[in-house]
Image (cartoon, rainbow, N blue to C red):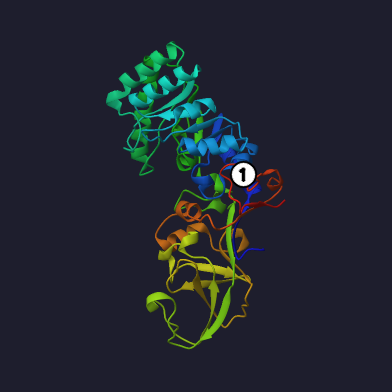
Amino acid sequence: MTDFREAVIDLDAVQANVVRLRSLIGTRHTMAVVKANGYGHGAAPVARAALAGGADWLGVADISEALVLRAAGINAPLLAWLHGPDADFAAAIAADIDLGLSSALQLRQVAEAATVLGRPAFVQIKLETGLNRNGVDEADWAEVLGLAAAFERVGRLRVRGVFSHLANTSAEDDLTAIASFDRGLAAAAAAGLTVDLAHLASTAAALRLPAARYNMVRLGIGIYGQSPFDDQDAAALGLTAAMTLRGRVAAVRQVNAGAGVSYDYLWRATADTTLALVPLGYADGVPRQAMNTARVAINGSQYPVVGRVAMDQFVVDVDSDSVTVGDVVVLFGDAAAGVPTAAEWGAAAGTINYDIVTRVGARVPRRYVGTLAENTDAGAPGVPGADPTETAEA
């Protein structure tokens, strides 16, 4: 470890997680969701690892994320589904990016861009089935699907898929959404559309709700080795955490009973003890709310975070154990390694494992390991969107 902070990303774990999930789920198609810079892991390296594991589609939120993948030389089928009013649909069409559309206005904008380019756009229609975010309302299905079919007939676009998303609130709510989605698929057929793809489930529903699988699932948190469930951890699912967040002890000091630590003295030593300073803070994604509850691993033992988490650093109480400057500190990683997990940090901070891994900041270098790491160009000159602090290690 050369930096005093780093996120180690095991690309072989990503590949193995995709293989594992595909074996459990069994759909013909699998989309690996790599939005938000691959949930903080690095979009392009994760995308390649997921494709190596058998994913045949990639998913991102917006067009800019999709274009970064294309610029990195990734040519796999790719869907982007969240668009602002001034989205660059022409750039997406030119880069062979499928566009998830949620309104008649977006359909018209895409059809116009396709006409200007002289080539059809590939689109997938998102239906509102109960989550009440983006998606075509059921009252508008006939209009929007009919418009899509009309544009398809004149060659301005091709409707490749229909999709939606579940709230994961309860089995009853999800079954209601599935029934709504089935009505949407029937409405698409009634409008004259023949779609290749129907997808509704993310990792949670893909694992526990077979009726939601259709012919493609969108795997997000699971491919990163994190469980989407509160009652079943990653190990029970056969998944391996891909990210290990580490730092090095920057300072060690002995303090007397009663000594306060960090801002506002929200923790005071109850006895004489030893404190270790770790150079990561909320600027790096360490949740401020995790003070006095989260734990880290140093030299094979776990210790509590004490006092306020600051912007660049936090403090650990190591009691009377021998800890020295330069010792490696693991905030979270794979439970099999005897270290805290992202889920445990999420519980300590009153949030979820998704939030913990995705929030890791840009100044934390990503170091890629595993047999697939030698094939990643993360951090290489001329790769748009690459973090210059990213390195690969076989």
Query: Which residue is pictured at 57% across the width and 41% down the height?
Result: 21
Does 326 sit left or right of 208 as displayed?
Answer: right
Q: Is residue 18 visible?
A: yes
Q: Say few, some or many: other residues with alpha carbon within 10 Å of mark 1 (under 14 / 14 to 19 / 20 or more).
A: many
Which residue occupies the foreground of this view, 173 or 32? 32
**In which image quadrant can residue 310 be found?**
bottom left
Which residue occupies the foreground of this view, 306 or 391? 391
User: Which residue corresponds to mark 1?
Assistant: 45
Q: Is residue 157 visible?
A: no
Does 94 sit left or right of 163 as displayed?
Answer: right
Question: Regarding mark 1 in the picture, which secondary structure is present there?
Answer: helix
**In which image quadrant can residue 183 be found?**
top left
Look at the picture and state if 362 lies above or below 143.
Answer: below
- Residue type at mark 1? Pro
Which residue occupies the foreground of this view, 278 or 293? 278
Query: Which residue is pictured at 44% across the width and 26% down the height?
Result: 124
Which residue occupies the foreground of this view, 165 or 367? 367
Residue 332 pos. (x, y %): 55, 61
Residue 5 pos. (x, y %): 58, 63
